[in-house]
Each structure stands twice: as structure tokens, then as C-alpha cells.
Image: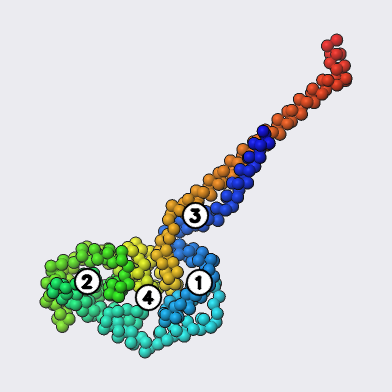
Amino acid sequence: MKRLRIGLGLSGVVLCALTCALVWTHARDAAVVLAAQDDPAELSDLAVDSLVRNDPAVIAENIEAALAANDADLAGSFVELAMAKDIRLSDELTRRVADAIAEQNSSSHFARSFAAGLVTGNTEDVASLSGTVAGDLFVFGDIRDVVREGKHLVMGEDTDRLILGLAAAGLAVTAATYVSLGAIAPARAGLTLVKDARKVGRLGERLTEWAGRSAREVVDAPMLQNAVATGSVLRPGQTIGAIRAAFRTEKAGALFRAAKDVGRVGEKAGIRAAQDTLRVAENPKDLARAARLAEASGGKTRAILKLLGRGALLLAVGAFDLTMWIMGALLALFGLLSSIKTTTERVTQSWLDRKKARRLRNQIASAVSPEGAMATAGVTG
């Protein structure tokens, strides 16, 4: 019976030790991830390390895909990420990326993109954004968007009220940008990027809903409708004044903060990274996290967003699941220590019982031996 109890205790020790060995790595990784959940840069770094560890070729494959899509900016971002992670790329691949980036940055390409951004308001790269922001800073872009959408509103046609609200906000920010000598330029660029993302369908659904609500709150619809009904690009002074009167600056704090975060992403990581952020972000908190990620990761940001999506900004796995790994490891450790304690007590008790039984047998043997009997008789005589 005692051997059975000791055997059960030893079995518990072995079982708990194996469980600890199996869950320890997961629990350790879960603890590290939970500790980094409020730091998007560290969180994404851990996720990328795990991804590259499981698939070492993922960086090179994404570079090839980016080059095939004529996206030199994304390919360059992946090269930066590979260098940061000490991942060796072939000389031929890095040369192709360098050539693609050189072509993208050529003066002829810059001139074409700048003109396209200025006229159409669509941004694809730094050059086109420069043109779009230039148009917005000189109020041409925002007035163009307000008048175009406003005419739809007046005529009872389908109107993109988000574009209308963003353009109105842009006019207010433009004036503040001049007054502050560019101190709030990131917010100006951010509004331009959000407006462009909305136009070409790059704005995430949930972020669109939030931005739409914010735009409606900061705009006095009847006043704006009257302003755009009589407004014109040919009368910028009169049009701007009427639109500004319809804009409620006191309620635009959240919209301006979100735009500023988008502008910070564009400033630190590039225009395409800001556009990718607008595609995956769902709320202003995501935008703020993306800005922190861009400030820490710079040019690598776009590659990180491509690999991880929204998982680059927050926990992709539920905190509850990670906590369960940690709890499982703690329970296994508790079980191991309890099994060791119980087994030690049983072994010690068995050893003491055997020692006591041996002493008792020796005493009995001494009592029944001839010498022991004579000694006993002498004592009794």
C-alpha cells in the first residue's frame, strides 16, 4: 500500500514536470506579450520575430510581391525590416529594390505625381501628397471638394458628407497652420490623407463610421448648405468665410487629434504607411498607436503593417487566452511542487516506518536469543 502511494506521488511529479515543460514556453511568450500590450512598437516587434521564426522566407517573398506590384516603397520597407532583423537577402534582390526606388524618386516621376496630386487631390506617394497638400494649403483643394459635394447636397443628389466635413475642417486648419507657422502641419496633412483615403475607398469601414459621426458633429448642416450653394472656387474669400462660419471648431478636437496622428505616421513612416494605417485602423486609438509605432519603427512601419495588419497596433490574440497559458503554467508548477512535497513526505514516512520496524525486530530478536534470555533471567533472579 505504501509503495502504491509513493508510486502515485512519483507519477504526479513526472506528469506535472512534463506539463510544465510543455506549457512553459507558451506561458513565457504570453507573459512577454501581455507586458508589451500597451507598446505597439514592442508588441509588433515580438509578433514579427515569431512570424519570421516560423517562416524565414516571408520577408523575401513579400519583397518579390511588392516589386511585382510596382510598389517600390513597400519593397524598400521590407528591406529595412530585413536589415533590422539581420535577415540576409540576395544581392540581386536588393539591387532590384534599389533600382525601383531610384526610378520612383526620379525627377520626372516626381513632377508627374505632384501635378496629379495638385489637380485631382489623390495621393499615392510623397510627390502626389506634396501636390495635394499644396492645393489644400492654398485652399484650392478644400474649396474644390466642398463645392463639388455641396452642389450634390443642394441638388438633393448623393452627397459624401464625410468629404464635405473633412474639407470644411481643412479650411479651418489651413488658417491655423498659417498662424502657427506650420506647427499643426501634421493635422493639415492628416486631414488631406483621410480625405483622399475616403475618395479612393481606402478608409476602413469602422473608421469611416467614426469619422462620419465626427464630421456631422462639427458642421452646421444648414449653414454649410447655404455656403456651398453660393460658393465658388472663383470667389475663394467669400466661400471660405461662409464655410468657416458653419464649422464648429469647439467640437472638432477628436477629429483634429486623429488627423494629427495620421499626419505623424506620414511624417515618420511615409505616405503609403499612413494610407495602410487608415485601411486597418478602426478607431482613433488605433491611429494613436500607429503614430507611436511609426515614431519607433520609421521606414519599417509599412512592412510591419503588411505582415501583421491590425495586429501591429494591438493584441491579435485575446488577453484572456494569453492569461490562460500563464495560469496553466502556474497550476502545473503548483502541482509539481505539491507532488514533490507529498512524495517526499511519503518516502520519509516510509523510511521512518522501516527504521522503526527494524529497531523493533532487533529488540525482539535480542529478547529471544540465549544470551538475551540469560540476561533476562539474571535480571529477574
Cα separation between marks 3 and 4: 33 Å
* Residue appearing at x 15%, y 76% in the figure: 151
State the mark number for residue 272: 4
In the picture, measured across the screen, residue 155 lies left or right of residue 42, that is left
The reply to whether callout 3 and callout 2 are in contact (CB within 8 Å) is no
Check disc 1 and report its element: helix, strand or loop: helix
Q: CA distance from mark 1 to mark 2?
A: 39 Å
Residue in the image at 50% along x and 66% along y: 51
Depicted 115 relative to depicted 44: above or below: below
Q: CA distance from mark 3 to mark 2?
A: 45 Å
Q: Is residue 109 left or right of residue 120?
A: right
Quadrant in which the C terminus appears: top right
Question: Which residue type carries mark 1?
Answer: Val
* Disc 1 to disc 2: CB gap under 8 Å: no
Residue located beneath label 3 in the image:
31
> Are the residues tagged 4 and 1 within 8 Å (C-beta)?
no
Pointer 1 residue: 58
Q: Position of residue 308 (x, y in %)?
A: 44, 67
Q: Residue furthest top?
A: 381
Q: Position of residue 74 (x, y in %)?
A: 43, 76
Snapshot quadrant of residue 251 = bottom left
Examine the image and state in which quarter residue 109 appears.
bottom left
- Label 2 element class: loop
Mark 1 or 3: the one toward you: 1
Residue 42 appears left or right of 369: left
Closer to the chain start, of discs 4 and 2, is 2
Query: How far apart, in angstroms, are the residues tagged by discs 4 and 2?
Result: 23 Å
